[in-house]
Amino acid sequence: MSVTQDAFAPDHYLSRPWGLKSWLLTTDHKRIAWLYMISITGFFFLAGFAALLIRLELLTPEPLFMGSDAYNRMFSLHGIVMVWFFLIPSIPATLGNFLMPLMLGARDLAFPRLNLISWYIYSIGGLFTVASIILGGVDTGWTFYTPYSDQYSSSFVIPAVIGVFVVGFSTILTGLNFIITTHEMRAPGLTWFRLPLFVWANYATSLMMVLATPVLSAVLLLVAVERMFGLGAFDPALGGDPILFQHLFWFYSHPAVYIMVLPAMGVVSEMIAAGAQRPVFGYRGMAL
């Protein structure tokens, strides 16, 4: 009896069925990383197209093909999509999802279904943001500063705010998954100071995601509620304080700088160490 070579082929994330259903219902961390890669790349090109239009408009001192209001909406589109839908999730959601279990010696992340749900939440948040673009755009910039965003803007602030609010839950769930996986699913003998620096970078990033993102979600919810119902959180006429928005917003958005850069530093650390075939000098200090 002959035995085909396929019988001994290992089970691989690319060797499984390629139907749309198998990808959309997968719990394989590698396939979910690819789903994120495709979605994030799409948003990158959308934000990049807005940047291209901005730069073309700046070729001449006088308006070239769009007025000041359209220009404001275009750079707001660029900022909102590039920051919230590309820079923040880019490395953790793609390389982090793909490599973290492999580097930890785990079969998958701690919560595979939650990992898939986080991608669906990310996609739903993106749909709200795209809806704001289709309806006419938003002109507040990516920071949604009050009092302009909650009182004076005539653009479609609510769908854009809801989009960023929703995508924050995807960030929180991804960070939570990484933290628990790092704590509970390391291979035997893989102690903390044997972890690759890429794992350390994503672990530190995940802590910031889980601790800081709820503050952003809360303040954006307040903006939406005040704009719709006149709550009075940031409107001085109603006893609010517009500067409070900035305090709460930057409680998240300053750590967001490190959410963007720390995973990249982990990638660079691994690439240099592999290319030089030497361990990173000062590993413990770098990890701490």
Image (spheres, grey):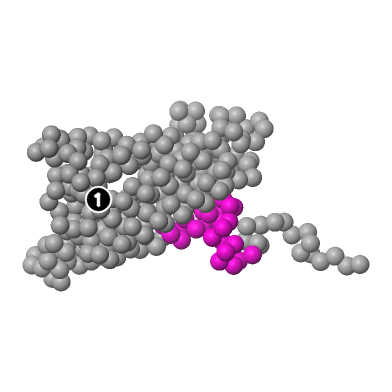
- Residue at 60 percent across and 66 percent down: it is 18
Disc 1 marks which amino acid? Trp
User: Is 62 covered by the magenta stretch?
Assistant: no
Q: Is residue 92 left or right of residue 225?
A: right
- Residue at 32% of width from left, 42% of height from top? 217
| Magenta-colored stretch includes residue 25 | yes
The residue at which mark 1 appears reads as 142
**Visible residue check, residue 163:** yes
Where disc 1 sits, the SS reads loop
Crowd tier of the residue under label 1, counting other residues whose Cα lies within 10 Å: few below 14, some 14–19, many 20 or above = many
In terms of secondary structure, what is the magenta stretch mainly?
helix
Residue 230: horizontal and vertical position, in percent? 17, 44
Q: Dividing the picture into quarters, in which one does residue 171 lie?
A: top left
Q: Residue at x 56, y 38 (%)?
A: 181
Question: Camera-side residue: 103 or 254?
Answer: 254
Horizontally, is 228 left or right of 252 in the view? left
Q: Which residues are magenta?
A: 17-40
In which image quadrant can residue 154 be found?
A: bottom left
As drawn, 53 above or below 214: below
> What quarter of the picture does the N terminus occupy?
bottom right
Kindly tell me whether residue 246 is visible in this rendering. no
